Amino acid sequence: MTTPAPSPLNWRKATASQGSQGCVELAPLPGLIAVRDSKDPDGPTMFLARDAWRRLTEQANRGDLDL
């Protein structure tokens, strides 16, 4: 789901991505994780249920989503 983000959110970017050309930023909300593109902070924000975010990151870490 994509919708304008409530403001202000406490956005965080992985320390390993500092100085990179871009990555995703996360902001915790009650029951949700807000996700946005760090290169486009005024662009759309995606909201995922915490368990959906956990499943997504588990799949990515296993390589299930590699192209």
Image (tube, helix red, strand yellow):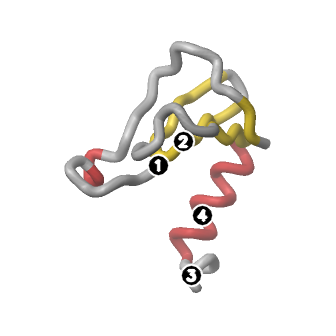
Q: How far apart are marks 4 and 2 (CA)?
A: 19 Å
- Mark 1 and mark 2 lie on one chain; the one further toward the N terminus is 1
Label 1–label 2 contact, CB within 8 A: yes
Label 4–label 3 contact, CB within 8 A: no
Identify the amino acid type marked 3.
Asp
Where, by quadrant of the figure, is residue 60 drawn?
A: bottom right
- Mark 4 and mark 2 lie on one chain; the one further toward the N terminus is 2
Q: How far apart are marks 1 and 2 (CA)?
A: 6 Å
What secondary structure is marked by label 3? loop
Q: How far apart are marks 2 and 3 (CA)?
A: 20 Å
Residue 31 % position (x, y): 72, 29
Identify the amino acid type marked 4.
Glu
| 58 on left or right of 40 | right
Label 1–label 4 contact, CB within 8 A: no
Q: Which of 36 and 14 is in front in this view?
A: 36
Residue 17 % position (x, y): 29, 53
- Mark 4 and mark 3 lie on one chain; the one further toward the N terminus is 4
Q: Which residue is drawn at 64% across and 52% down?
A: 54
**Disc 1: CA contacts within 10 A as few (<14), some (14-19) or many (>=20):** some
Q: Which of 31 and 37 is in front in this view?
A: 37
Residue 66 % position (x, y): 56, 81
Q: Which residue is drawn at 47% across and 42% down?
A: 40
| 61 on left or right of 52 | left
Query: In the rendered image, which residue does mark 4 sit on?
Result: 58
Query: In the rendered image, which residue does mark 3 sit on?
Result: 66
What secondary structure is marked by label 1? strand
Q: Distance between the residues labelled 4 and 3?
A: 12 Å
Where, by quadrant of the figure, is residue 55 drawn?
A: bottom right
Q: Distance between the residues labelled 1 and 4?
A: 16 Å
Identify the amino acid type marked 2.
Arg
1 vs 4, front mark? 1
**Disc 3: CA contacts within 10 A as few (<14), some (14-19) or many (>=20):** few
